[in-house]
Amino acid sequence: MCVSQAGLLIDLTVGATSVCGATLLSNTKLVTAAHCWFDGRYQGERVTAVLGSTTLFSGGVRVQSSQIEMHQNYNPNNLNNDIAIVTIPFVAYSNTINHVTLPSSFLLWMTFEGNWAQLAGFGVTHDGTVGVTSFHAGGGCTIGFPGGYARVTSFMSWIEARV
């Protein structure tokens, strides 16, 4: 899947550095990992969200974040509650920019344990965290290496209260 097909990939940048990925939840809200803003040592202040681009550093719509809210129980030492909401100015939906549908119904009760998941991103430009990815193995995005992810269904009430 490419960005022009789904319109769901968002890159968060600081200057010329890609720091994390995010997912558009509404015209003004993104969800990402809390460790993108505070890793236990460094505190972020503001990022540029790049929406609707098939490349990291050109094209698309670029907007500055106006607020970043980390989960109140986020712990950078063990990555518990590693989730954050980013507020951006209103962005119109298009064929390259669209929101995701949050899980509902029976999906809210599934653990997804033992299921395969598919990640979307900008390709193998470098290994790093994307979206609500909490960690990955030293091998990065290589097949067979583990990664840790914050399960969105575990945070639905927290997310919905902010969107």
Image (cartoon, helix red, strand yellow):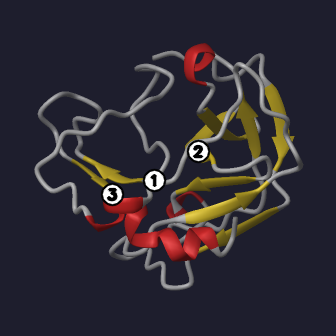
Q: Which residue is mark 2?
A: 23
Q: Nearer the viewer, residue 107 or 3?
A: 107
As helix, strand or loop, the secondary structure at mark 2 comes to strand
Q: Does residue 150 appear anywhere in the picture?
A: no
As helix, strand or loop, the secondary structure at mark 3 comes to helix
Q: Quadrant of the N terminus?
A: top left
Q: Quadrant of the C terminus?
A: bottom right
Residue type for callout 2: Thr
Residue type for callout 3: Leu
Q: Does label 1 or label 3 sit earlier along the sequence?
A: 3
Q: State the CA–CA distance, disc 1 to disc 2.
A: 9 Å
As helix, strand or loop, the secondary structure at mark 1 comes to loop
Residue 6 is situated, as x and y percent measured from the top left of the image, at 56, 23
Residue type for callout 1: Val
Q: Is residue 148 above or below residue 160?
A: above
Q: Is residue 105 above or below residue 133?
A: below
Which residue is located at x 54 percent, y 46 percent? 101
Which residue is located at x 19 percent, y 39 percent? 116
Q: Which residue is mark 1?
A: 132
> For the residue carrying disc 1, how many other residues have a C-alpha within 10 Å: few (<14), some (14-19), or many (20+)?
many
Q: Which mark is residue 107?
A: 3
Which residue is located at x 42 percent, y 40 percent? 128
